[in-house]
Image (cartoon, rainbow, N blue to C red):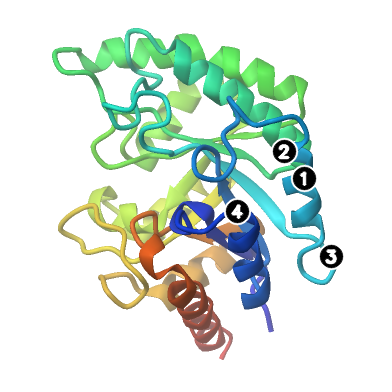
Amino acid sequence: MRPPFLIGYGTNGLADHPLPAALDLLDDAGYDAVALTLGFPHLDPLSAPPGAVAGVGARMAAMRDGAGAAVVVETGTRYLLDPARKHRPTLVDRDAGRRMRYLTRAVDVAAALDARCVSFFSGVLPSGDRPAEGRARLLDRLPVLLEHAAARGVTLALEPEPGMLVETVEDALALRRDLGDPPGLGLTVDVGHCLVVEPGGVDGALRAAAPVLRNVQLDDMPRTHHEHRPFGDGDLDLPATLATLADIGYQGVAAVELPRHSHAAPELVAASIEALTRAWKEVSA
């Protein structure tokens, strides 16, 4: 018996493989979905040649014996916009032009791939800036992205990240309220992050986000710091996490997020789906 949500794997954990080979690994392992991180080395939305997006879409449509894999678009490539500054510029920087162009193009790619959502983060507040300044920039810029996404039938999903201006689910929900609760803005929740920054842990964060939860990232993590690890190498209770997802009625993509483990991708692609299958059997029993 399969879970009611779709099990995926993030391509940022397959960065040593060309994208076709990465998708072959996921297809052979039996994943339902792909969390496609836009940028090098796979699909850079700012420089992709004509036909590249359509080619990726055709390959994904052929997965699962022709039934097709679900897709979420991720936008966490580290040095894509500035080779000297990880993730910069972000939406909370004074000049976010390159980030806005990247996210706008990500929405276009998501529309072409019929992706479930485009996941994105707020960013780390620049040194010397006040939180109110960063928040004002988000409130100014997000409506522009939301309008672009709505015109293309694409949902955005804001991910709280440890150390960023929007760090917790409550931060994201508060920002969403200040924007007027736009229907096109949902949340991404990384369950590993919940161990580090969420007062209510994984269960509390998922339940708080449930009404607008559009994307889930799965990874293990120690409670002490932000470090993505394979299942079993941290403090995550994987069966309890899957049980909560089922209990809140989540039916979207839940994708393994191991961005620092590309060196062991073939082993971890197989081991992760095995761990998820075992955990779900425990929940079902």
Q: CA gap, disc 2 to disc 1?
A: 5 Å
Task: Quickly name the residue at label 1.
Answer: 55
The secondary element bearing badge 4 is classed as helix
The secondary element bearing badge 1 is classed as helix
Residue 179 in sight in this render: no
Q: Determine crowd level at label 4: few under 14, some 14-19, many 20+ residues with C-alpha closer than 10 A.
A: some
Callout 2 amino acid: Ala
Q: Which mark is residue 19?
A: 4
Rendering coords of residue 129 (x, y %): 19, 12
Q: Which mark is residue 222?
A: none
Could you tell me how many numbered marks the image carries? 4
Q: CA gap, disc 4 to disc 1?
A: 11 Å
Q: Assign the C terminus to one quadrant of the image.
A: bottom right
Foreground tag (4 vs 3)? 4
Callout 1 amino acid: Gly
**CB atoms of marks 2 and 1 within 8 Å:** yes
Q: CA gap, disc 4 to disc 3?
A: 19 Å
Q: Answer with left or right where residue 231 lies relative to residue 113.
A: left
Callout 3 amino acid: Ala
Q: CA gap, disc 2 to disc 4?
A: 11 Å
Q: Nearer the viewer, residue 141 or 23?
A: 23
Marked residue nearer the N-terminal end (4 or 1):
4
Residue 284 in sight in this render: yes
Task: Quickly name the residue at label 2.
Answer: 52
Q: Nearer the viewer, residue 212 or 96?
A: 96
The secondary element bearing badge 2 is classed as helix
Q: Determine crowd level at label 1: few under 14, some 14-19, many 20+ residues with C-alpha closer than 10 A.
A: few
Q: Answer with left or right where residue 246 lies relative to residue 196.
A: right
Rendering coords of residue 11 (x, y %): 52, 54
